[in-house]
Image: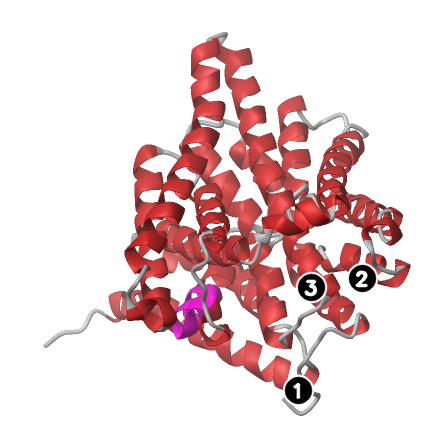
């Protein structure tokens, strides 16, 4: 029987790359404590240089799998958010809102120094720069088994940043639609409708799933994890069909589920081995979407924006440190730990392109250098910041 060697290579390309990424990540973490996600991104970048997407069969489902992977992360992030903490300590909420708005303003100003960037691209870049990477930060937290004031603040601030980033990008898309078509209804449908309906779908699942688990033994076992994972899969499928934001819906789902008092044990965090596998795929896939020509072209701008964004995060958290109940050192570590930015941003841009944002491709090429730097080096900064805050609970041997 004749074997088509080219088809065989195409068929095994992704599994081989994922195995390679896992092996490299595990080796570098064991030897030098380099965060695994940074290694996954590095492998993904190398994959992009050899143009892996063209070496594989035409698999239309890869973006969907990536959205499922990130939605699981966002569900877990939302699940770790305690809304009562915002009422008890409103300075945390104010810090999150302030750093997001100031980042938007600072990045918009910084991109305005270049004459060749269009207005709506500048607005989109500023909106995306507000977001930290929930996937990158959560992976580092899991590796370090980190817990403490800085860790909890980073989680809550990341959730705020992501929510406001989605809101800002949808408003930019709406203003772009209004400018092009002059149709107020179309502009509102593309922004306000998407935001409101995405939140409503997430809240609906957040109320229904705990009722489904109530009184069942699965609520205190791995069965609860399976039900939540299947619910996130349903949510992403429905959101994709209705052209909503699965990322915003998943985050809302997690927040509401937490408030409904359905608990996941520590061993069920990150959705076990399936979550680990999806995380490897997510970082490799997203990094493979970055094109080197865009990275080189935007590297100088990216370096400038990385500095501007980091300065805002650090200054805001330093300014609100003592009034919110932590030391200046922990405020500094909190600002630094928010550095990563990649998967959330790239997938948001991709979803924007699917719903008609005609500047999506130009926006991604503009921030390619910034995204690569922050996802390669950002997890390292987060790791060292959490270690400096003495919140890591992993010994040198492990």
In primary-sequence order, the first of circles 3 and 2 is 3
Horizontal side, residue 170 vs residue 246: left or right:
right
Q: Which residue is mark 1?
A: 31
Image: 113 above or below 366: above
Specify the principal SS of the magenta part.
Answer: helix
Tell me if residue 193 is in the magenta stretch.
no
Q: Residue furthest top?
A: 182
Q: Which residue is mark 3?
A: 151
Residue 221 spot, x, y in % from top left: 36, 73
Q: Quadrant of the N terminus?
A: bottom left
Q: Residue at x 52, y 13 (%)?
A: 178
Q: Residue furthest front?
A: 215
Q: Residue at x 50, y 17 (%)?
A: 177
Q: Which residues are magenta?
A: 270-279
Query: Which of the pair 186/253 is nearer the observer?
Result: 253
In primary-sequence order, the first of circles 1 and 3 is 1
Instruction: Kindly state the secondary structure of the residue where label 2 is placed.
Output: helix
Q: For residue 62, which quarter of the picture?
A: bottom left
């Amino acid at each position: 029987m004749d074997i088509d060697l080219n088809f065989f290579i195409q068929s095994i390309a992704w599994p081989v790359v994922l195995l390679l990424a896992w092996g490299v990540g595990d080796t570098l973490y064991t030897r030098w404590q380099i965060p695994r996600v940074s290694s996954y991104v590095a492998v993904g970048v190398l994959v992009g240089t050899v143009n892996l997407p063209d070496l594989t069969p035409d698999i239309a489902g890869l973006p969907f799998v990536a959205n499922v992977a990130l939605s699981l992360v966002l569900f877990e992030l939302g699940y770790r958010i305690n809304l009562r903490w915002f009422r008890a300590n409103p300075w945390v909420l104010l810090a999150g809102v302030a750093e997001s708005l100031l980042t938007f303003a600072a990045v918009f100003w910084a991109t305005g120094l270049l004459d060749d960037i269009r207005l709506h691209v500048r607005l989109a870049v500023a909106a995306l720069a507000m977001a930290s990477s929930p996937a990158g930060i959560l992976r580092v937290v899991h590796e370090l088994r980190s817990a403490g004031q800085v860790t909890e603040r980073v989680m809550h601030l990341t959730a705020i940043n992501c929510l406001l980033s989605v809101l800002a990008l949808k408003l930019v898309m709406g203003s772009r639609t209004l400018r092009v078509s002059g149709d107020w209804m179309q502009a509102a449908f593309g922004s306000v409708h998407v935001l409101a309906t995405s939140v409503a779908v997430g809240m609906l699942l957040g109320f229904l799933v705990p009722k489904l688990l109530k009184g069942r033994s699965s609520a205190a076992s791995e069965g609860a994890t399976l039900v939540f994972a299947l619910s996130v899969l349903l949510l992403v499928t429905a959101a994709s069909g209705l052209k909503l934001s699965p990322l915003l819906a998943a985050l809302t789902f997690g927040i509401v589920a937490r408030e409904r008092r359905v608990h996941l044990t520590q061993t069920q965090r990150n959705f076990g081995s399936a979550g680990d596998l999806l995380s490897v795929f997510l970082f490799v896939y997203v990094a493979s979407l970055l094109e080197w020509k865009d990275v080189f072209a935007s590297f100088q701008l990216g370096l400038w924006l990385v500095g501007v964004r980091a300065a805002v995060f650090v200054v805001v958290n330093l300014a609100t440190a003592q009034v919110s109940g932590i030391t200046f050192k922990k405020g500094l570590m909190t600002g630094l730990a928010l550095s990563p930015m990649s998967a959330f941003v790239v997938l948001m841009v991709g979803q924007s392109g699917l719903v008609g944002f005609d500047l999506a491709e130009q926006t991604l090429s503009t921030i390619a250098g910034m995204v690569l730097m922050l996802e390669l080096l950002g997890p390292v900064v987060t790791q060292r910041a959490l270690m400096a805050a003495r919140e890591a609970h992993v010994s040198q041997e492990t």
